[in-house]
Amino acid sequence: MALTFVTLLPLRGEAVDRGKQVVVSSSAPAAQLLDTVENAIWAADGQAADKPVYVLYSTDCAWSKRLYDDTRSLAGKVQLRWIPVAGGTATGVVAARDGASIAGAFNGRSARLPDTAAAQRGLAYNQGVMDSVNYQMRPYDRSSTFAFPTLVYRTRNGVKLVAGNPRNLAALPADVLATSGATSMPAGIAISAQPISLVRSRNLPKWSHRQATPVVFHAAPSPQAPPIDDLGKDLLIPVSGIVGTTGWIEVAPWGADKRKAYVHDPVMARMATLEFRVKPQGGQWQARDTVQVREFPDAEAPVLETLNPGERYQRRGMVDRNGEAWEQIVLYADGTTGYVKR
């Protein structure tokens, strides 16, 4: 997808580079970036809701605190929508979503949480939002070192991202394009409301993408959750669980100790929890006709190979499922098995 660069300056996390800007002018990527921050779990600060400025920040960040202090002069001109991503009091802002919680969190005070687990899930969702901003900015800068705070807002020329504190805060209100369509109830609230219920992946230790177009991973098992990474064809990635019967698969692209990602693949999600037992059986198996060898003993399972009549393979066992008989054969020299319907 081609991107048009209106302004392109390197994004870095160091204070000396604070205030660097990128404007995304192409409609599709601009809309996706704006949708990502609009649906984060943000807290409103100020009444000018027609001029929202989204701020990804840490409650422990001195630069974020400085931005908060400096923007008191913008009251009535813009509405800052603070998206807590990190910090010891960040969950208090996620839970309360009001101006008082923003100010209190910067001072080390946090309102008592009615549901700490829910607030932690909301904070994790916002961390996915930050991951998504890094992912969406790869065509512009691959360093992924965005400073706290990072501002995102709509302008006449597209969606602007400012990494770090803006150099001229007084000019910010004039730069923000007024709009009446910004949401007041972010999708992230509903998405993170309930804990993710996982079932064990019995048959799928790793998941691979089999299409030519890269697949996108999401920060949560929902098509509305922000995109955080992608994967090319035939690359394998560890599976950590299956999200119930939703068709979503939880994967661990950055290792077991990192945050998880989610991919929607209903067929393979079902294959991962397929119940069957292989009855050992030896001997040779020979194809009588042209047959398809499937990855699992199921008619919807992916086809591994198509064999011609007369081809012979070692038989490993038999499977009876729902009145259908499948033969398990050793398909490759590394011991990989496949299934052919009898």
Image: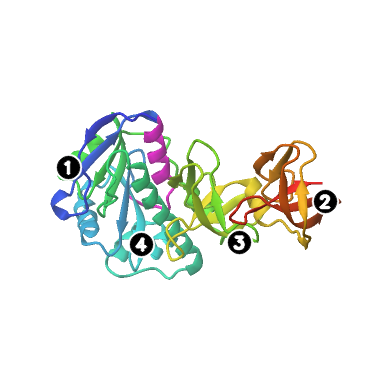
Q: Quadrant of the N terminus?
A: top left
Dot 2 corresponds to which residue? 325
Mark 3 to mark 2 CA distance (whole Å): 33 Å
Q: Which residues are magenta?
A: 28-45
Residue at (40% x, 50% y) in the render: 129
Q: Where residue 330 appears, x then y in whole percent?
A: 68, 53
42 sits to left or right of 296: left
- Residue type highlighted by circle 3: Ser
Residue at (76% x, 42% y) in the render: 287
Name which of mark 3 and mark 4 comes first in the sequence.
Answer: 4
Mark 3 to mark 4 CA distance (whole Å): 30 Å
67 sits to left or right of 2: left
Q: Is residue 114 visible?
A: no
Residue reaching furthest left? 16
Q: Where residue 45 appears, x then y in whole percent?
A: 33, 51
> Residue 197: which numbered mark, if any?
3
Name which of mark 1 and mark 2 comes first in the sequence.
Answer: 1
Dot 1 corresponds to which residue? 170
